Image: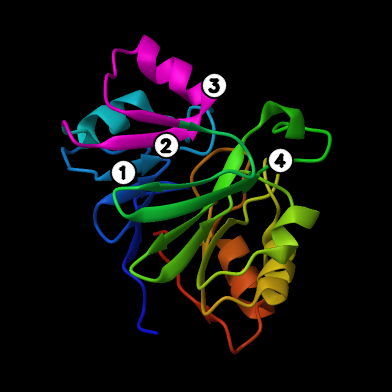
Amino acid sequence: MQEPNVKINCHSSICIEDNVFVDPFNIMERGSAKIIFITHSHYDHLDVKSIKNLLDTATTIVCTEDSARILKNNGIVNEIVVVSPNDVGNVADVKFETFPAYNVGHHHLKEYGFVGYTITIKGVRYTICGDTDLTPELQSIKTDVLLLPIGGTYTMNAEEGAKLTNIIKPKFVIPTHYNFIQGTAGKEAEILFTNLVDKDIKVLIKIK
């Protein structure tokens, strides 16, 4: 498998194959999204200004109910597909599955219904974990490209991220959710994570 076409603007703002976006954040320039996936409604994952910069008339947004309310209240009239954990769907020839994304006892509680996504594009499975701890649900995921947070505080840390990566055994792993938001780890987490991941898994660094 060749190296995937994945970019990270910053933090957890992800672009796959140039037109599928996940949690667009801090995007200042105009673009054109085929689909926008949103994991949950916190400001660094649901950034209305960034979303509006990516919309055209054909853009579909896939998100949880809490995010859908915010988007509609901000005048967004594009098609919105509302999801919950453990849903499956297909939008514009892109298949997706959701799973719960949560912390145990803090910040992102399981009952809030936040999600992560496994998205299949051209036969390649991309898993975006969202803001989550290392949970039992994540350990059974099968994927080609794993994007997971390593910043700690609001998510799993570098050690936990590496442990999960070595359980899932993707072809590629891309760490996210660090070196931007106050209270999360900096570039040192990236180094630790890379050193702890099994050597047969390719670590791709996309955060500057």
Type of amino acid at the residue the image marks with label 3? Asp
Q: Sequence order check: which comes first, mark 2 or mark 1? A: 1
The answer to the question of whether label 2 and label 1 lie on touching residues, with beta carbons closer than 8 A, is: yes
The answer to the question of whether label 3 and label 2 lie on touching residues, with beta carbons closer than 8 A, is: no
Type of amino acid at the residue the image marks with label 2? Val
Q: Which residue is mark 3?
A: 66
Select label 3 or label 2 by which is in front: 2
Asked which quadrant contains residue 142, the reply is: bottom right
- Residue 134 seen in the figure: no
Q: Position of 72 compared to 179: left or right?
A: left
Label 3 residue SS? helix
Q: Which mark is residue 87?
A: none
Instruction: Residue 114: give x, y in percent of width and height.
Output: 62, 35
The answer to the question of whether label 1 and label 3 lie on touching residues, with beta carbons closer than 8 A, is: no
Instruction: Residue 38: give x, y in percent of width and height.
Output: 46, 37
Instruction: Residue 152: give x, y in percent of width and height.
Output: 69, 49
Type of amino acid at the residue the image marks with label 1? Ile
Q: Which residue is mark 1?
A: 35
Q: Which residue is mark 4?
A: 102
Marks 2 and 1, how far apart at CA: 7 Å
Label 1 residue SS? strand
Marks 1 and 3, how far apart at CA: 18 Å
Asked whether residue 122 is drawn in magenta, I would say no
Q: Sequence order check: which comes first, mark 3 or mark 4? A: 3
Q: Sequence order check: which comes first, mark 2 or mark 4? A: 2
Q: Which mark is residue 62?
A: 2
Q: Position of 184 compared to 81: left or right?
A: right
The residue range painted magenta reads 57-81
Q: Sequence order check: which comes first, mark 1 or mark 3? A: 1
Label 4 residue SS? loop
